[in-house]
Image (cartoon, rainbow, N blue to C red):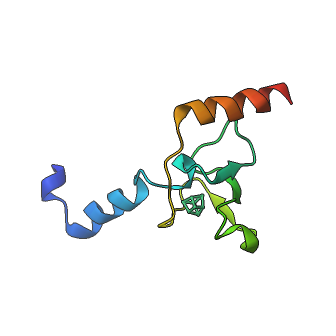
């Protein structure tokens, strides 16, 4: 069955599961393990508007304050973690 023939609930579920703009790709996500972070990784959200709540989020969470992290920033964080 092609994707166009799937019932709407299944199509929507895929979009939610594989959405791109999630915490893992957000500049405000501080994963517990930067070297092995994936969608299931947990970490803190350090956005200035959310920091006071000490939110623990996972890589697959998201919110409307999402700001895409640049690859150079990811490389820097991972380099620092590998030296720790
Ligand atoms: S909760 Fe929102 S601001 Fe915080 S890391 Fe996730 S997407 Fe970014």
Q: Which of 77 and 14 is in front in this view?
A: 77
- Residue shown at the point (71%, 55%) measured from the top left: 43
Residue 76 pos. (x, y %):
68, 30
Relative placement, left or right, of 58 versus 65 is right
- Residue shown at the point (55%, 51%) measured from the top left: 26
Q: Which of 2 and 37 is in front in this view?
A: 37
- Residue shown at the point (39%, 61%) measured from the top left: 16
For the C terminus, the image quarter is top right
Residue 5 pos. (x, y %):
13, 57
Residue 33 pos. (x, y %):
74, 42
Q: Which of 66 and 60 is in front in this view?
A: 66
Residue 21 pos. (x, y %):
44, 54
Relative placement, left or right, of 71 versus 20 is right
Residue, far right: 84
The tally of labels here is: 0
Residue, far left: 5
Residue, far bottom: 53
Relative placement, left or right, of 2 versus 27 is left
- Residue shown at the point (61%, 35%) measured from the top left: 74
Q: Nearer the viewer, residue 18 or 30?
A: 30
| Figure quadrant of residue 17 | bottom left
Please tell me in which quarter of the rendered image ligand 1 is found.
bottom right
């Amino acid at each position: 069955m092609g994707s166009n023939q799937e019932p709407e609930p299944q199509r929507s579920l895929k979009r939610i599961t594989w959405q791109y703009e999630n915490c893992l790709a957000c500049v405000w996500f501080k994963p517990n393990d930067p070297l092995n972070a994936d969608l299931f990784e947990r970490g803190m959200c350090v956005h200035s508007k959310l920091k006071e709540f000490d939110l623990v989020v996972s890589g697959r969470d998201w919110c409307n304050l999402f700001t895409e992290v640049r690859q150079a920033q990811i490389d820097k964080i991972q380099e620092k973690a590998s030296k720790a």
